[in-house]
Amino acid sequence: MILLDGKKTSADIKEEIALEVAELKKQDKKAPHLAAVIVGSDGASLTYVNAKVKACERVGFESSLIRLPKETTEEELLNEIAILNIDKDINGFIVQLPLPDHIDEQKILMAIDPEKDVDGFHPMNVGKLALNLPTFISATPFGILELLERYNIETSGKDVVVIGRSHIVGSPMSILLAQKRKVGNATVTLTHSRTKNLSEVTKKADIIIAALGIPEFLKGDMVKKGVVIIDVGITRVADSSKKNGFRLVGDVDFNEMSEKASHITPVPGGVGPMTIAMLLKNTLLALYRQEN
């Protein structure tokens, strides 16, 4: 069994980006500039945004963190986005989700300039993705494609099962892997909570992408020998043997699956670290597109 090491792969990608940015600076060109907007003080969101800022520093990007109080109105946030949309110094920006309940997330995402939408959530970018046109692929699906490519996992003609139909991972993943592309040309089945006899479907799969958010849902007896497992889930589970009282697990029962899988992503250290790396890659792409 081979571990698909997202931590190492993301570090490799960041190193490649850093070299590219250093080359830009040698030519007296501007470095990419990524901005992040966060509303309120959600602990997990703050941790994630701070990790993005540190990643920017590591690769030589400029970065801006805009922290707004939880009481910020929808109109105030829309005004902030309007300023970022026209700021020529900023190549890409994200609005950290979730937002407070009084703010309409979809309205906010719609307000972001698609050319600066490095999260890839704007409907225009989602539409381009569906049509296989150049666009920003949202970071988690982008990271999964990169892992599959760098570990030379063949997808062409393979049976792929995606478990979970979220707009962030499941749905775009099913579209991307079915497309005519280097990591694609697969026969994809998108499954979800209403799928009947799920194990009958998963047992036929060559590759499974589990993104449903139920800890250790996928068991060893639900797959065939030699399957490739991409585990997108991450959940805290109580564990009194741990100093902090919990452990992190994915949507896949790792112990059972390690006896069946040919390749598998660990949790943590698999898909998660790839997300920030691909956000940086999208920001670099944004810079190049805006220059042309």
Image: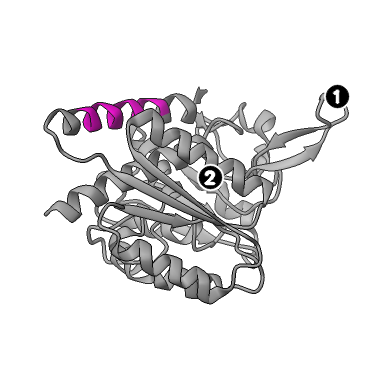
Q: Is residue 147 magenta?
A: no
Q: Is residue 41 left or right of residue 56?
A: right
Q: Secondary structure at mark 1?
A: loop
Q: Main secondary structure of the magenta part?
A: helix
Judging by the rendered image, the residue that carries numbered circle 1 is 241
Q: Residue at x 24, y 32 (%)?
A: 21
Q: How many C-alpha atoms fall within 10 Å of the one at disc 2: few (<14), some, or many (≥20)?
A: many
Q: Position of residue 169 (x, y in %)?
A: 49, 55
Q: CA distance from mark 1 to mark 2?
A: 30 Å
Q: Is residue 97 left or right of residue 145?
A: right
- Seen from the viewer's position, the closer of residues 87 and 234 is 87
Q: Position of residue 267 (x, y in %)?
A: 61, 33
Q: How many C-alpha atoms fall within 10 Å of the one at disc 1: few (<14), some, or many (≥20)?
A: few
The image shows a total of numbered marks equal to 2
- Seen from the viewer's position, the closer of residues 213 and 46 is 46
Colouring: one colour
Q: Position of residue 199 (x, y in %)?
A: 63, 52
Q: Is any part of residue 271 visible from this angle?
A: no
Q: Is residue 109 left or right of residue 249?
A: left
Q: In the rendered image, which quarter contains the C terminus?
A: bottom left
Q: Which amino acid lies under the numbered mark 1 shown in the image of this protein? A: Ser
The magenta stretch spans which residues? 11-22
Q: Is residue 227 left or right of residue 181?
A: right
Residue 49's disc is: 2
Q: Residue at x 38, y 71 (%)?
A: 123
Query: Which marked residue is nearer to the observer: mark 1 or mark 2?
Result: 2
